[in-house]
Image: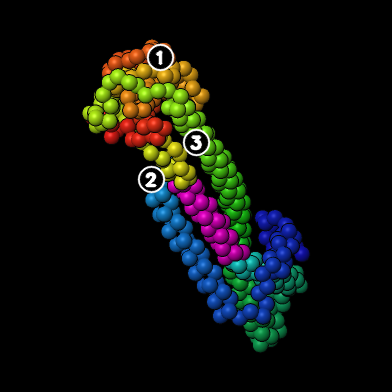
Amino acid sequence: MPNPESDLPAVSWLRASVLGLLLLIPLQGVSAGSVGGQQESRERALENIRREIESLEARLEEVSRDRDDSAARLQGLGLEVRIQVQRVAEVRAERRLVEVRLAEAAVAFELAEERLGSSRRQLRRGIVVLYRLARGGLWRWVLTAPKVEQALSAIRHLRYLSWREAFAVERYRGDQATYRESRKRWQAEARRSQELLASERGRLRRLEELRARQKRIVEALDREQTGLAERSRELLRRQARMTELIGFLSGRLPDVESGSPIQRFRGVLDWPVDGEVLTPFGPRIDPRYGTQVPHDGVTFTVAPKAAATAVFPGVVVFAAEFEGFGITVVVHHPSRVFTLYSGLELAEVEKDDVVSSGQRLGVPGARMYFEVRVEDRPEDPLEWLR
C-alpha cells in the first residue's frame, strides 16, 4: 500500500505489530461495557498492589530501626523480598493496562491510516477530473455556449465539482490530523510498554538479588548457630574438666589445717581483681539462638595494671596452663573450699605456695574468670564477695 503521507516512513512493520497485538489481546466480540469492566478491575488490582507495597514499606521501616539484631535483619530482608515481589506484580499489572491501551491505539492507528489513504485517493480522483475538464476546454464551452441555459448548467456543474473537491480537501486534512494523532498515541503507548518491560526485568533482577542475599544470611546464621552450639558443647567439656580437676584435688588433698573456715567470711571477702562484672554466675541463654551456655563463675573486666589477688588465705594446689582457661591458679582454703583464677597472662605463685589474703597471684589479661567451689560444687562468687 502506498504511504498516505510523503513524509512518513514505511508502515509495513506497523501492520505486523498491530496484528500481533490483536492476536495477544482479542477485541472482537467484546462489548464496550465488558472491556470497561475489565479495565476497571485491572486498575483496582493495581491500586491494591500499591497499597500493599506502602504497608510493607512501613513495616520495613519499623524493623530497620534495630538492624544490629540478626533476627531483625533477616526479618527486614524478608520484608524487602515481599516488597519487591509486590513491585514486580505492580509493574506487570500496569503493563497489562498499557498493552490494552496499546492494542486500542494500534487499531485506531490502522483505521486512521486506511481512512487517510481513502481520502487521499478520492482527492486525487477529483483533481484528475478537474484537470481533464480544464484541458477539454470546459470554460471555453461555457463562454461560447449557444444558449444561456446550457451555460448555466455548465456553471452549476463546475460549482458542484469545486465544492466537492473543497470538501474532499478538508476531509483529507482532518483525516491527516487524525492519522498523526493516532500515530503519536500509538508510539507513546509503545514506548511506555517498552519502559515497563525494562522496569519489570530490572525488578526481577533485584528480586533475585534479594533472595540470594536472604539465602546467604540464612546460611550464615545456620553456620553461626552451629558454631555456637559447638562452642556451648566445648564450654561444657571445659567445665567438666575443671570440675574433674577440682574433684581430683579435693579428693587427694587433705583439708587445710590452719586458719578459720572461709564460710565465716562469706559475703565480706575482697574482690579478686579491680574491675567490673562482665558476665555473672549461672548458665546463659543466647538471645538469638536460645542455646544454653554454662558459666560456673564470674567474668570480670580488668582495670589497667590490676593484679589478681587471693580472696582468702590458702595453699596453691594448681598453677599452670589449663586447656580452655589459659593460665589458671587454684587456691585451697580451709573447709575444702577452692577459689579459681583463670585468664592470667602470668602466674606469680607456684604449686604448694602458701598465700595470704590479698596476696598477688598473677597478672590478668583484659578479662579474668573467677570461681568459688565448695568441695567440687560451684557457687555464685558474688555471694562471697563484698
Crowding at mark 1 (Cα within 10 Å: few <14, some 14-19, many 20+): some
From mark 3 to mark 1, how far is it between C-alphas? 29 Å
Magenta stretch bounds: 71-99
Q: Earlier in the sequence, mark 1 or mark 2?
A: 2
Asked which quadrant contains residue 360, the reply is top left
Q: Which residue is mark 1?
A: 352
- Judge whether residue 80 is colored magenta: yes
Per the image, label 1 sits on a secondary structure element best described as loop
Which one is in front, 87 or 267?
267
Image coordinates for residue 144, horizontal then vertical, percent: 70, 78
Give coordinates of residue 220: x percent, y percent.
56, 40
Element type at marker 3?
helix
Which label sits on residue 65? 2
Indicate the secondary structure of the residue bearing disc 2. Answer: loop
| Three-letter residue code for mark 1 | Asp
* Amino acid type indicated by mark 3: Leu
What residue is disc 3 on?
Answer: 236
- Mark 2 vs mark 3: in front: 3
Name the side, left or right, on which 375 lies relative to 359.
right
User: Contact (CB < 8 A) between labels 1 and 2?
Assistant: no
Q: CA distance from mark 2 to mark 3?
A: 36 Å
Of labels 3 and 1, earlier in sequence is 3
Q: Amino acid at mark 2?
A: Arg
Q: Residue at x 60, y 48 (%)?
A: 208
The image quadrant of residue 170 is bottom right
Foreground of the two, 367 or 58: 367
Q: Main secondary structure of the magenta part?
A: helix
* Mark 2 burial class by Cα count in 10 Å: few <14, some 14-19, many 20+: few
